Image (tube, rainbow, N blue to C red):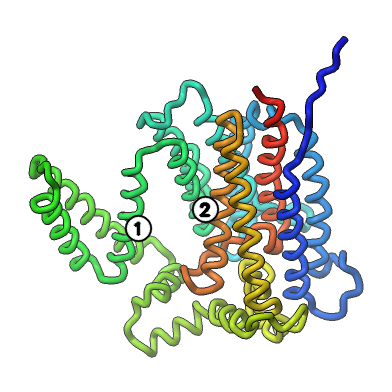
Amino acid sequence: MQRDHRSFRVDWLTLILFLILVGFGWVNILSASISGEVTSYFDLDERYGKQAVFIIFTLVLIILILAIEAKFYERFASLIYLLSILSLIGLFIFGKNVNGATSWYGISGMTIQPGEFAKVATALAVAKYISDLQTNIKDFKDQLKTALIVIVPAALILLQNDAGSTLVYGSFFFVFYREGIPKSYLITILGLILLAISALKFSVIPTSISILIIVFLHHFFIKKKRKRIITPILITFFCTTFVFGVNLFYKHILQAHQQERISLWLRLEKDPAKLEKMRKTFAYNLKESEKAISSGGISGKGFMEGTRTTGKFVPEQDTDYIFSTVGEEWGFMGSALVVITFVILLLRILHLAELQKNQFSRVYGYGVAAILFFHFMINIGMVMGLIPTIGIPLPFFSYGGSGLWGFTILLFIFIKLDSNRINEW
């Protein structure tokens, strides 16, 4: 009886990059959360102690993920997605409210955030559906069904008042684009984003007039083959309706603190006194974060030597604002190394995704890269004041068991799929 010798390997570069990020993340959590002399690195009364325990469980989780057969993740992707949706729905009944968002289950003194694991389930479900032989992503019906897979968990998370996590689901558009949806979709989305910014920055009427002028100039003077006049009229009507909708959404749907954050980012407030009051009230975290980063200089102040970090000037510095600790204590050089490490990890994932022999693994790989990139871009951009304040963690860096485990599962399922590539024909 002949044995089936199946090769198993792990992409060591990806694994090493993961360990570097998790290890350096813990070092910065230690610096940001320490409140006295360190008696034990596993002190459960301190966040750095809890994170150390989370990391140990993470290593166990990695072994379990790699021990499971690779085909399991594809075979049970739909079931995992369904269970994830049920866990999100359950929050409306059994959820615990933390900082205004009902996104956690309270279990024996611990909190679990199912939204962090829903990203994994959604990436698996999207990969499963797109790779199905009956699916043609260029067909509008299949595009709609694929979009619904993403919209359902995103809507449930939004209803829990967690707008930051909801935005992450927009990252799946990059996956759809890689798999062949029309380029016009990308142009349309970018155009709508610019329209939304313009509507808030320059108000509705000037934006609407600009739309009218641009559309009709393009129709009559730039476009070589002019179609019926109804086309520019419909485009103008749609864009103007969208602009008015953005204005209504901003004024009547968004909460006050969300409006203030966008207003500060776009500098919508003209009254200097009101602007200064808004900065003190809503931009305190950002101002302190920027001060911490700028004080680090080129080489930083040194480990646990950051005065703004040890002085607890930056709220949430071990979670959403963890990058400000890097900037103060490790300076520009340390911050650049963190960014470079993330970029290498993302490029490595994309490279491995393109090497996959089946579509499921490739699509899932792009989902992993898109989610990690979105978190990375938003978090660092937020800490540096480049984008509005949005409460999402820096992958593998920020304090929290749910976030660390969610990102670990996301990444190591792909590592397992890639390790099985040599056995696929």
Badge count: 2
Would you say 243 lies left or right of 226 here? right
**Element at label 2:** helix
- On the image, the x and y values in percent for residue 259 come to 41, 69
Q: Is residue 69 visible?
A: yes
Q: Which mark is residue 98?
A: none
- On the image, the x and y values in percent for residue 62 come to 78, 44
**Which residue of the protein is positioned furthest toward the right in this rendering?**
39
- Crowding around mark 2 (Cα neighbors within 10 Å: few <14, some 14 to 19, many 20+) is some
**Element at label 1:** helix
- On the image, the x and y values in percent for residue 88 come to 59, 45
- On the image, the x and y values in percent for residue 185 come to 34, 44
Q: Is residue 20 above or below residue 234?
A: below
Q: Is residue 397 above or below residue 159?
A: below
Nearer-N-terminus badge (1/2): 2
Q: For the point 35% across and 80% down, which residue is it? A: 269
Picture quadrant of residue 296: bottom right
Identify residue type, mark 2.
Val
Quadrant location of the N terminus?
top right
Picture quadrant of residue 17: bottom right
Residue placed under numbered mark 2 in the picture: 168
Q: For the point 9% across and 53% down, which residue is it? A: 221
* Depth order, front residue of 377/50: 377
Would you say 356 lies left or right of 212 here? right
Would you say 129 lies left or right of 55 here? left
Q: Is residue 90 visible?
A: no
Q: Which mark is residue 193?
A: 1
